Image: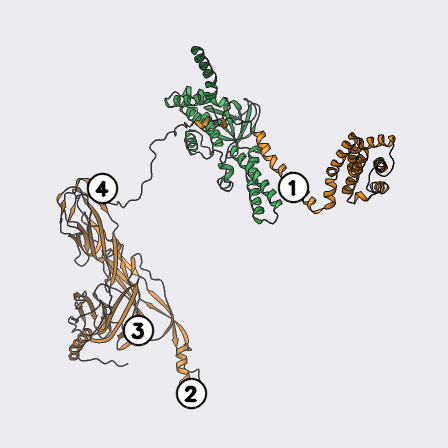
Amino acid sequence: MTRIRPQHARTTFWWTSIGAILATLVLPTGAGAASITATINRTEVAVGDRLQLTLTLEGSSAGEIELPDLSAFEVHSQGQSRNIQLINGRMNSSVALNYLLIPTQPGTFTIGSVRTKVDGKAVMTKPITVRVLAAEETPKQTRDLFMIAKVSNESPYVGEQVVFSLRIYQRIRLAQASLEALDFGGALAEDLGKESTYDATVNGIAYQVTEIKKALFPQQAGELVLPAVRLNAEVVVQNQGGRRRGTDPFGDIFNSPFDDFFGRGRTETRTVTAPPVTLTVRPLPPAPANFSGMVGSFSIKANLTNATVKVGESTTLSLTVSGRGNPPLIKEPTLPALEGFKIYDDKPTLQSQVDGEGLTGVKVFGKALVPMRAGMLSIPAARLTFFEPATGEYVTRSTTPITLTVADAPASEDLRLTQLVTPTGGKVAVRLLADDLLPNYSGLDAISASALNSGHSGLAALGLLIPPLGFIVWVLAMRRRVRLKSDVAFRRSRMALKEAQPFLREATSKLKAGDDHDAAMALSRALRTYMGNRLNVEGTALTPRESAQLLADRGAGPQTVASVEAALLCCETFVYGAPDSRTRVELTEHVRRAVSLLKGMAAELR
Amino acid sequence: MTTVLIWLMALTLRATEPKISEPSMLWLDANRAYDSGDYDRAHELYSTLVDRGMTNGHLYYNLGNTQLRQGQLGAALASYLTARALLPRDSDIRANLSYARKLSKDALVPPEPNPVLATLFFWHVILSRHELWVLTIAANLLFWGLAAAAYRWRQSEALRFGAGFALLILLAVGVSLAVRYLSPTQVAVVQTEEVEVHAGLSRDAVVRFKLHAGSEVRVQDVMESWVRVRLPDGLEGFVERTDVAVVSW
């Protein structure tokens, strides 16, 4: 692999051209806050290694980019990439400009701020420090797979941040690789982002490097040994003698790409080890009384949201601690007692960031301040004492005191004082202070007549029994009605007595009036109507003999049959023959007994 | 003449007035006595009303309040339980009952229906016996009425459905009522300061445990002069009937 190294003279020209490109760059519109950030993929390289510098621009239009002095590097542009994100309907767009930097000499260099104007606003990046090692310092290994573990500082103080980096150099393809769990021997470890991959040259050989970084915070003074790290890898070895090359004219065409594509080469398990690293952890010197326990370099500042408020209104005091160290361990600066305020602590917010040198953090401690009196109230300086490993001393930083102008509030607003401020605490359970009976009932309905209800059980029983009985009666009635409607014979037999009754009454009245002939006719009719209806036949057409026979057939008793026959014969005598006084007596007797005769038939007939 | 008339009027007034309003007069007097702090008089008047056969939840509630004011915890609890049986949904009665329960000495869970069953068969708990009767009779009438109508108009789906629904209600309230009569909840409330629970039906029998005023325990059996009680943990024994008030609903 040959690399073209442009001359230094060319780079100057090159920088001007970047400016020209950027001047014509039209960033997508609708972007968020205008900003520029510079990131570098690693901060420690050897001479001849490659560094990736990325400038990320956010905003809608960018001006000319002013670059710092980069004379220690060769600079190559690697083009730009555009990134558009749609988050919650808002479009965020950014442009990333990529550069390749190749250090030309050993030493520690600072890539100064990159300045430009985005959306008319002057923006700049943070400076980045890069350490360039002489080429000899790199391991003299020429193998195709090896691993190096390094720490940024071999003699840190207790609690100082140490960046541990593990680099895997490879020149061959790995089918699979598994790293044993990292052991940091009791030091707190924090991830420093995902592993990064870049190309590096060691002794003139180009490697692909995978770097894993952790921030370590030793917890105890003394020797801290980070044990050897082992990597088990499946290395792809090209299968060279497998095919009959030469005999097959197409062998070369087909074999090589397929071997590559399907990884037809066999694999070989290989274990590589990074040697152990020993740190000598130094104890902290005797601490002053107000030491916060933080180790690192930090700065603090205080600011208020409103410099003038009214009595009872709230303003927020933010104490911001930022710097390099263990972010979760950042403590609140000590603020002297505030006179004339009610103070409500807010939940602190913490933001951790990773840069090339490890973890940095910004922690903001918010406090809602409610001034209780008017006038000029001062917020004194807050102090924070920490240990700074760079100087090896305890450092106390303080904020600048702030003066707050408090105006009188209208008197009526005093009452709302507690409502204006929402305490962060939860709700308070209602406490029962004392308990007593609820009062008596005084309504007169308690003594109503219905209160005297002990003897309703009979009524209740009726209430239970009457409906089913009513139902039974109803059902029987319905059935009878249905039968009367559908069965002529049934209806006739039910109505027989009823229909015969008028004739009987007529017979009695005619007899009393002395009209024997008509009385006999009526009696005959009564009997025949009854029989006809009851037996469902044409009764008027029956002779006495036939009637008797019919009655006997349908189950009437012999006495009843005889009586009916006799009565009918007697009637015929009156109608067709010559009645005498004896027949008249008989007729009277028959009429008298007719009712019981009919009832007898009703009982006996089937 | 006029004097005679006035006399007659006075006589009739005298004769009729006490008859009609005596219970209400007693009631008002009792409430007044309670409000003025004369609990003995209030107790006497409320008891008179109870003795006259007044069965009303509010009356028992007021009586219970009076008894509690007098320091008769057991009697008050018995009155509240009776009041609750008559007016099961009255929140005042429930509040004062639970207040009174806090005053009892023994840490016993009062015999209350299982919450799951009480939710499933809610009508059994939230309806008084009287209300159950009224509902049963109404559901009875409705069911047989709808059944008769459904018999007459056989093609009507709605009538048949209605009759089925009425039958469901009738069964629910009817069974509930039957349970009230066949196996009523019987609770003995301890009336005296301390009561000995014996292992047998005799004062000489071993004292298994002691209960204190206001404790409510389930009754297993009521005998002539003894009551067999059972604690929630299954402990059983006999107490003298005069020492407890048995309330059933």
Q: Nearer the viewer, residue B161 or A433?
A: B161
Real-space Cα separation, disc 3 to disc 2, in angstroms: 33 Å
Q: Is residue A54 left or right of residue A570?
A: left
Real-space Cα separation, disc 1 to disc 2, in angstroms: 103 Å
The amino acid type of the residue labelled 4 equals Arg
> Vertical placement of A7 versus A326: above or below?
below
Q: Residue at x 42, y 89 (%)?
A: A249
Kindly identify which residue carries mark 2: A250
- Helix, strand or loop at label 3? It is strand
The verdict on a common chain for dots 4 and 3 is: yes
Q: Is residue A231 left or right of residue B16?
A: left
Q: Earlier in the sequence, mark 3 or mark 2?
A: 3
Q: Residue at x 42, y 87 (%)?
A: A250
Real-space Cα separation, disc 3 to disc 1, in angstroms: 101 Å
Q: Chain B is which colour?
A: green
Q: Position of residue A324 (x, y in %)?
A: 22, 58
> Vertical placement of A521 versus A325: above or below?
above
Q: Earlier in the sequence, mark 4 or mark 2?
A: 2
Q: Quadrant of the N terminus of chain B?
A: top left
Kindly identify which residue carries mark 4: A416
Q: Chain A is which colour?
A: orange
Chain on which label 4 sits: A
The verdict on a common chain for dots 1 and 2 is: yes
Residue A283 appears in view: no
Q: Nearer the viewer, residue A78 or A208?
A: A78
> Residue A208: which numbered mark, if any?
3
Kindly identify which residue carries mark 1: A475
Q: Earlier in the sequence, mark 4 or mark 3?
A: 3
Tags 4 and 3 in contact by the CB under 8 Å rule? no
> Vertical placement of B126 versus A392: above or below?
above
